[in-house]
Image (spheres, rainbow, N blue to C red):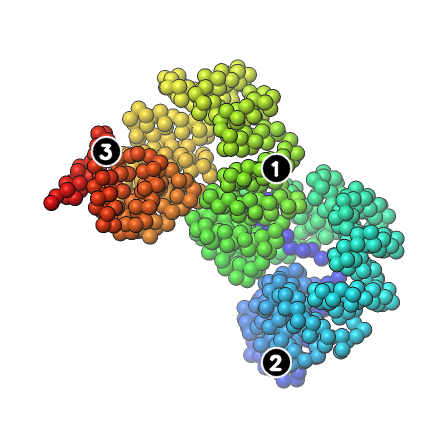
Amino acid sequence: MSRFENPPIRDTWTQPGVVPSTVRGLALGALISLALFALACGGDIETRLAEVRALQDVGQFNESIDELREILAISPNLPEANYRLGVALMQTGEPSRAVWALQKAAESPDYSIVAGLMLASAHYSIQNNEEAIRAADAVLEVDPERMVALLIRAQAHVGAMQLEEAWEDTERLVELYPDEYRVRALQATVLADLDRLDESEEATYLLKEMGAASGDPELETRSCLAPAYFVQEHRKDVKKAEEIYRECLVKYPNDSFTIGQAMKFFDRIDKPDEATDLIRRSVEAAPEALALRSNLATRLTNAGDLEGAEAVLMEAAESFGSAAAWNMLTTFYRRSGDSAKALAALEKVIELSGGGSDQLRFTQADVLVDLGDLDRAEEVAATLKEPTYARLIRGRILLERGDAAAALEAFDAGIRHWPNNAGARYLAGLAARELGDYERAISELREAIRADSGATDAALLLAHIYYERGEYKPAVNFANSYVKTPARPEKDQAYVVGIRALTADKDYVRARKTAEILKEYTDNPSVWVLEFARIDRAENGSEVALATINASGLELADAAYEPLFRYWAEVLIELGRTEVALAKIDEKLARDPDVSANHEIRASLLAELGRTDEARPEFERAVELDPENAAALGGLATLAARGGDLGAGVKGFDQAAQFARGEPNYAYSAAQLTLASGDKAGAEQRLRKIVRRSPGHAGARNDLAWLLAEKKEDLDLALSLAEEARRMDSSPDILDTLGYVHLQRGESAAAVAALELAVEAEDSPSIRYRLGTALNQTGDSERARLMLKAALDQGSAFPEREAARRELAALERP
């Protein structure tokens, strides 16, 4: 899957922008200054700037970037170089990276207008409305009637919901430029936002008249639809809107913009087939229009027809033979997760582009990382002249090599210059998660979604993180966000995490509704049967869950249904019917005797029945068939620990953890055995690692909190861990730990509250001892005496028995 944004490739169908003519009319003083500076540098900078001007005059903005970087390395404050770099970055689709250079250029009086306008535009394009207003203000202080500055400021005010300020700018624009189409379009928008609908409707029909009379084909098509938008959105008159759309389609049958907007409209009014037929007819009528083919491919992709979309794009690439057409195919393959095909298509783009720019080599390195070819990716990365590209791709390579800390440093440096790169934010989130900094991970992943919700799996990862942390509502929200994004490859995972979060939150009605959607979405029926069974077990108990699985009629011995089989066996074990599951796994083994998982499951069932001598050779056979079967390795480790060989148990669980990436329970078992062997320092080190990497592991948080409280160190961390564990699990052991941490911190009242809940759930003498101690510290000596006496009267041995006896004796002393 692609990680970074795919840089745009310009072709004849996309006209590059033009550098404003004001750049060529610099004041004489500025020219003299530049001439003197050029003499000081041997004339080299002025010569190179002349080359840059020539490149940009013919629209070769990509080619000018490397030259400008070298000029600025020599003279970082040179206004024209900074301005032209900002222009180049804007023209190549990177407004967030253009900001810094444009800010530097705008500091010069000679560039305060042109660079200030470009800066305001850059901020507005990345939805940084406050900064856009500030940049426009600076321009208007110099030139109060500058139309573009007023337009940007008004639009930014709209974006910031400052409608009165937007209207002030709009009135001024209408007064100054009454015949300007953009001004009248803004007027219609602001009037509608102010709920002045009659005036807004009148303005939209004026736009249609202005466009029709303009002689500009682009304005004609866009203005034709203006009334349709209005009646659709503000009058809610779908019939009238449809009339206008059809009128415009008749008038402009092959215009990609009109067709694209009409398709969206037909989808909204539940006529998707008509929308698809419309774009197909348009492609047939205008096969030379690359944009129409792109629209058709996007349409098919969003509908799930990836083969159809690929065929459309492949035909376009082969027939057009242009870099732009091949780049469309590259983007498709990257978004659909086919990195090998993406690389082949990208190499064709590089060939057609005459060797490729930094942007293309950056993308090439990114795809090579997708393919796991890190050495070649590093070779390509070494050729990058643009520092931001080099830092970001280096960070990704470091992350893949396992150095999350160094990767995050590289991402930080790159993000400073490219803050709206969704892929960089996503990868920074991954690196932060690897380091256990979940707050940072969440922040970066949210930024990735804000920058481009469809570019990465950030929403899915956030759903998993929140689910693991026991924060079920945001987990559901981000799962929903993911499934609503078109062309996401793992929607079944998002549905599953959403269902499980709803189930954990006891919202069984919504959980079932979502499972019904999953039922229609997945081709494997065991996936949705499993989720219905989990809901039933949570709401109604294991008997109902078992009935749900049995009623599905699925042949559980089928290898494709293994996760459901495992869950079915787990339910049978809970109900005391392990022998039933064992009989079924014997059927599976008879069918597939050389499948490692079958031997491992049979061994686990035998171990559950206490038939250890039979279980061990089954686990060993499973490992023989698959040396990386983590569950089988874990099973052997469990048998070793039960036999008293804690060292072998630790070693076995460590091996299992190595092959079960993302599954913390093997590492946790190793930590528990380490603690049982008396190595508290080693156990603490292991628990810290689990806590860092697994935000939802309550047991590791509980145990680490206890160890820290026991030695009265890092008590703030201990309390944080205990509270996190309590949020995920309210079992007596975890309540006991929370109470103990409060007790060690001297927070007696809070300790009593937690320990009373623990005692209610489990009548443990150890918990009663700690509750008695906490009550004594609050001054309630009578209840403390009764609690300590109850602990001792239970008769059973417990670790704190002697301490409880001494404390009771002290309380009863006259």
Q: Is residue 636 shown above or below 437?
A: above
Q: Which mark is residue 513?
A: 1
Q: Residue 798 carries which label?
A: 3
Q: Which mark is residue 109?
A: 2
Q: Is residue 189 shown above or below 590?
A: below
Q: What residue type is labelled 2?
A: Pro
Q: What residue type is labelled 1?
A: Lys
Q: Residue at x 76, y 64 (%)?
A: 197
Q: Residue at x 34, y 37 (%)?
A: 760
- Earlier in the chain: of badge 2 and badge 3, it is 2
- Earlier in the chain: of badge 1 and badge 2, it is 2
Q: Is residue 655 shown above or below 13?
A: above
Taking the image as shown, residue 645 lies to the left or right of residue 312, namely: left
C-alpha separation, residue under disc 1 versus residue under disc 3: 49 Å
Whether residues under marks 1 and 3 lie with C-beta atoms below 8 angstroms apart, the answer is no
Q: Quadrant of the C terminus?
A: top left
- Percent across and percent down for residue 477 are 57, 47
Q: Which amino acid does label 3 sit on?
A: Phe
* Farthest residue, direction bottom: 29
C-alpha separation, residue under disc 1 versus residue under disc 2: 62 Å
